[in-house]
Image (cartoon, rainbow, N blue to C red):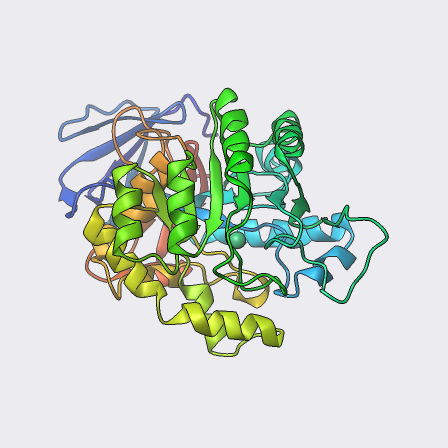
Amino acid sequence: MLTMANRILFTNGFVFDGKSADRVSGQTVVVESGKIERLDHQVVGNPDDLVIDTCSHTLMPGMIDAHFHCNSPSFDIPGLDDIPPSHMAQFARSYLENMLQQGFTTVRDAGGADIGLARAIDDGLITGPRLLVAGKALSQTGGHGDMRTPGHFSPCLCSNTAALSVVVDGVDDMRRHVRDAFHHGANHIKIFVSGGVLSRSDPIWMDQFHDSEIVAAVEEASSRRSYVMAHAHSPNAAMRCARHGVRSIEHGTLMNQEAANYVADREVFVVPTVSVISALMRGDFDLPRESKTKLEHISDRALSAIEHCEAAGVQLGFGTDFFGALHGRETQELIERAQVQSNAAVLRSATSINAALIQHEDLLGVIQSGAIADIIIVKGNPLADLSVLTDPGNIKLIMKNGRIHKNEFTDAPGD
Ligand SMILES: [Zn+2]
């Protein structure tokens, strides 16, 4: 029986370390007590070691999705509130299990999931990637997270989109909600700073939250040594985020060169989400008329925004933002990004850059001494051909926290 005390030696592979442009061969990767102990050309084995010959496949860090939604069975966001929490948790379980099988060993929820799912994973009740949660995303009244239809008049303004977001107005309310989110186990905070596609009444270009509200969220998160991620499509929204200390700008779809330069100067991350836009543009899902109009406005700008960011030296993260039947194809985002970036740049986004974004620099998203042993072994060379990652059948081994969840190499244990 394999225990955490046993060493695991991965031999005969090509190592992509999450940072370099090329793979390195001839190194044995030594995993012990859940960590990568070292990479070495010469390792003297012990009888208790588990030695896995990786057959010249690619050993690389488990991938990270920095914009994932657990509570996401449909693009009909108001309709999500008709799903009981226990049922929603089962949708989330299936998406999380699937993410792990695709080679994602960490996902950052961008609004909706509470700490319960992360605990269920840690307790072994469900299998899934490491999950970092925001609790409910925070929106102003009439903002992107206020999912009431414009024709729906509730007796009070306390609109609460239970599955994903909650409405917050004013500095005091913001501070209270951010404090409450951390009290309930949030790892980070999500706010909406511009209009969005799926909400009905707010234009994409609309600035959301007053500067003082953004600052309040950032201050409260900082006091927890955490940070704020912010939905922002427009150049102005992106610059407001950077000015007020937001750590990651989500989507950034309309960012121009000026905004990209401004964001790069302040070392703020941007997490593009392009494949969800492509899928919606193909008409795979029914959307309200207002959403379609907004979608058309952003769809042909998303890739050039990435080019502006790359030219400016912005640290580009990797996220998907999938809902409904899109789940299970998250690796498609790698392919879409490669239209305007090198394969190595895309893979760095999904590994080492995302790890830095989520405050796990040199612990996740890298194959190096001292890192947490989140490892996947892939048949083929993703640096030459990203499409090998779009077929989970090419992922021959999945390890998270030093524990093997899939292993097609030996008779050794796996889930
Ligand atoms: Zn999202």
Vertically, is 175 above or below 236? above
- The residue positioned 21% from the left and 49% from the top of the image is 312
- The residue positioned 46% from the left and 74% from the top of the image is 296
Image quadrant in which you'd find residue 252? bottom left
Q: Is residue 56 visible?
A: no
Decide which of 298, 151 is in the foreground and name it.
Answer: 151
Image coordinates for residue 16, horizontal then vertical, percent:
22, 44
- The residue positioned 35% from the left and 67% from the top of the image is 301
Decide which of 272, 8 is in the foreground and name it.
Answer: 272
Image coordinates for residue 162, horizontal then vertical, percent:
72, 48
Q: Residue furthest right?
A: 155
Decide which of 52, 172 is in the foreground and name it.
Answer: 172
Vertically, is 33 above or below 186? above
Image quadrant in which you'd find residue 336? bottom left
Image coordinates for residue 303, horizontal then vertical, percent:
31, 64
Residue 104 lies left or right of residue 257; in this view the side is: right
Image coordinates for residue 187, horizontal then vertical, percent:
53, 32
- The residue positioned 51% from the left and 50% from the top of the image is 68
Image quadrant in which you'd find residue 341? bottom left
